[in-house]
Amino acid sequence: MNPDTLSTPSQYTWAGRFSEPMSDLVKRYTASVDFDKRMWRQDIRGSLAHAKMLARQGIISAEDLADIQRGMVQIVGEIESGAFEWSLDLEDVHLNIEKRLTTLVGDAGKRLHTGRSRNDQVATDIRLYLRDSIDDIQILLGQFQTALLDLAEREATTPMPGFTHLQVAQPITFGHHVLAWYEMTRRDAERFAGVRKRTNRLPLGAAALAGTTYPIDREFVAAELGFEGICENSLDAVSDRDFAIEFCAASALLMMHVSRMSEELVLWMNPRFGFVRIADRFCTGSSIMPQKKNPDVPELARGKTGRVYGHLTALLTLMKGQPLAYNKDNQEDKEPLFDAVDTVTDTLRIFADMIPGVTARPENLRDALRQGFATATDLADYLVRKGLPFRDAHEAVGLAVRRAEERGVDLPQLPLAELQSFSPMIGEDVFAVLTVEGSLDSRNHIGGTAPEQVRAAIARARQRA
Ligand code: ARG
């Protein structure tokens, strides 16, 4: 390393132990302030709770506490107004704030770090930050779910083809399809609630790794910060990031669900399907092809799913094989975690906004149903009710479908006499079964597609909300 690139030693924090300055490259490589400063509110909240406990326990004086509180109020103002000067020399959010506090209030600022370490401090900050983020995400998920329920309600009776293998399978209601999306988000919300519970524990008090010699009161700090409990082992408290990994796993699953909805919206918007319209403000045009209207928002959501999967893999890999206790590797937890938070938050916000702008196109949905022999299973079930074994019914209907296909018509357009050539059990009443409405209404049990069930499911969902 060229000595010219060595900066003046600014490591006021540990200068006593060191005999040569850090190079600019090492400084830039090891610093995290550029990305961890977003946790400044949590850092200050944690410090204030810690200071309050120190004073209650007689470890610092009441005057020191008052000074710390006064200094922090000023720092909050400075950060909010943009006047605060973040310095790379001070490595991270913790040292930046502590240094400023000391400049403002003197020795009281230097006493704040008594009985704690940046290791338990950062673990506390991340947990607080993530807890706040999960709370925001739950609110957005709730708004997204309301939008889905409203759409399901608007289209509770609208028939559309249900697919398996992306081939027309059976008639379903549009509302029923949207309720499937809703169910996915319900489990997502449950998962985030579980992650929140395990995130919501206090590491402070673990200090660097072994605990501290001061008579601290961890339960008090936990209560001050709204934690449900404390991390019970100091080594584990400062080192594990499993809660962040879990958050990314829950986020990856949520995004996977969003990507599936997105894919369907992209397909459905294609004129070959023409199943839905999406409000123009969620689409963009082409710079060269004047006729284009592209479903950019669902496409991007589909794409951003990969990025969240990447963050999950990054954090799993970061943690793999790490010996106890804290290792600097863990500083790398923040960027993937923050980006996962941002991606999920933005995606939910935009989807909650977009879903009310989705409208079904009932005439196209019905056309698609007509082309796919969607009521063939209903005909087979009809024959079973008349006494034919299911396998025989299946075969008879298969032959009928082939005939209809040859003639270029749908099953209900075949004359009765012709239908009877496939099974003498077929009577005049078959046409009621072959209609789309008959097919839908007959699947009238909990979880089924009948409009009555769709409405009941929506009512249950609204009740829970
Ligand atoms: N910026 C560090 C991090 O994000 C804070 C903890 C540093 N601790 C240490 N012993 N170097 O993990």
Image (spheres, rainbow, N blue to C red):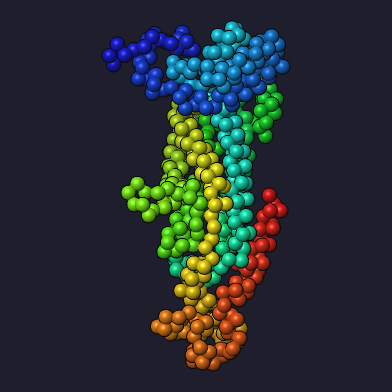
Q: Position of residue 94 (x, y in %)?
A: 53, 20
For image coordinates 65% across by 65% down, the residue present is: 453
Q: Is residue 367 left or right of residue 70?
A: left
The answer to whether residue 457 of the structure is visible from this angle is: yes
From the top left corner, tell me how far across and down residue 169 is, in percent.
49, 71
Labels in figure, total: 0
At x 56% / y 74%, what residue is drawn? 436
Near-viewer residue (331 or 283): 283
On the question of residue 180 being in view, the answer is: no
82 or 426: nearer the eye?
82
- Residue 406 sits in quarter: bottom left
The quarter of the rendered structure image containing the N terminus is top left
In the rendered image of this protein, does residue 168 appear above or below residue 358?
below
241 or 156, which is in the foreground?
Answer: 156
Q: Is residue 94 above or below residue 228?
A: above
The residue depicted at 44 percent of the width and 35 percent of the height is 318
Image position, residue 20 (x, y; %): 37, 10
Residue 190's place in the image compared with 214, above or below, is below
